[in-house]
Every structure is written in C-alpha cells, then in structure tokens.
Amino acid sequence: MIKNDRQREVTLLRISQFEQTLADMEADSTTLAQPKLAQAGKDAVRSQLVSFRQELAEYDVLRAGGPISFHLEDLAELPRLLIKARIAAGISEEELGRHLGLSEAQVFRMEEFEYAEADLDQLREVAVALGLKVVADLALVRAGS
C-alpha cells in the first residue's frame, strides 16, 4: 500500500524498472533453451507490475479527493482504513502529527507498521483528527453459526 507521495514516486520508479526488465526478458533469445523457466520469470514480473499499478491507482483515487466511504467488516482492517482516510482527506503525515502532538516521523512509523502498537484510544484519536464519522452496524457472530 502506498502511504505517501514519496512512496508513490518510488512505485513509479519500480514500475519503470520492471517494465524495462520485462522488455529485456522478452528480447532475450537465450531463454529459448528453458522456455518454461523463462515464462515463469516473465509471469512473475508481470504479476509484480500489476500489483504496483493497482497500488498506484488506489493511491491516485484516494488523493483525487471527494467524498469517500469505507466499509469495515473486520476491526483488523481499521489501521489500513485510517491510512486511506488520511490520504483521501489530503492530510500529510506531518499535518496529522500536528493534530496528534506527534512528529511526522512518528506518524510515518505508526503507519509503516499499520498502527500495530496503537491502542484503541490512539486509533480513536487518529479518526477524530481525520474528521471521520463512524456509522456502524455491529453483529454478534457466534462460533459455528
């Protein structure tokens, strides 16, 4: 997941590098001796390119602004949703840090590890700082149901 403009630029560079790698692989005539192995390598590069392009498209849609709503089915998804909400709100890591009384580096680390060390109160503070409105339907799902 691309979380900031720096990572977006790195992803663009990687896309370019992987496109060049794929072009080189396509032009390499020495792979004729092991076509299955060569095809597997090309497929792996293509798969990574698809992944990079999807991440880039998702980030660009979020950065475009406009109202966006998120559907949360599992609380484990909350950290990624908060990151997406920050991007969609057009709030930088530095700005979020100011709202939370943290440095940009601290916010970067929190997001890099997807709020793994954050407790529920900290996650709530992030949501409030982002201006998120939560509308929730909770369902109790019993084991075996």
Image (tube, rainbow, N blue to C red):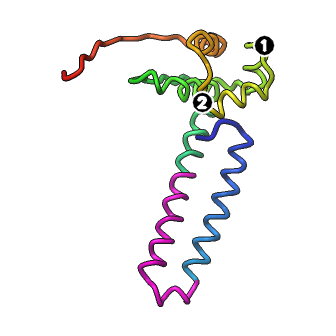
Residue at mark 1: 101
Is 86 left, or right, of 142 in this rendering? Answer: right
Percent of width and height locating residue 76: 47, 25
Residue at horizontal 74%, vertical 13%? 99
The numbered disc on residue 29 is none
Q: Magenta span: helix, strand or loop, mainly?
A: helix
| Distance CA(mark 1)–CA(mark 2) | 18 Å
Percent of width and height locating residue 46: 51, 64
Residue at horizontal 30%, vertical 13%? 139
Q: Quadrant for the C terminus, please.
A: top left
The three-letter amino acid code for the residue at tag 2 is Glu
Q: Is residue 92 above or below residue 17?
A: above
Q: Farthest residue toward the left? A: 145
The three-letter amino acid code for the residue at tag 1 is Gly
Magenta stretch? 28-52
Circle 2 residues within 10 Å: few <14, some 14–19, many ≥20? some
Q: Look at the numbered disc 1 and give the secondary structure of its residue.
A: loop
Residue at mark 2: 114
Residue 76 highlighted magenta (yes or no)? no
Q: Is residue 137 above or below residue 8?
A: above
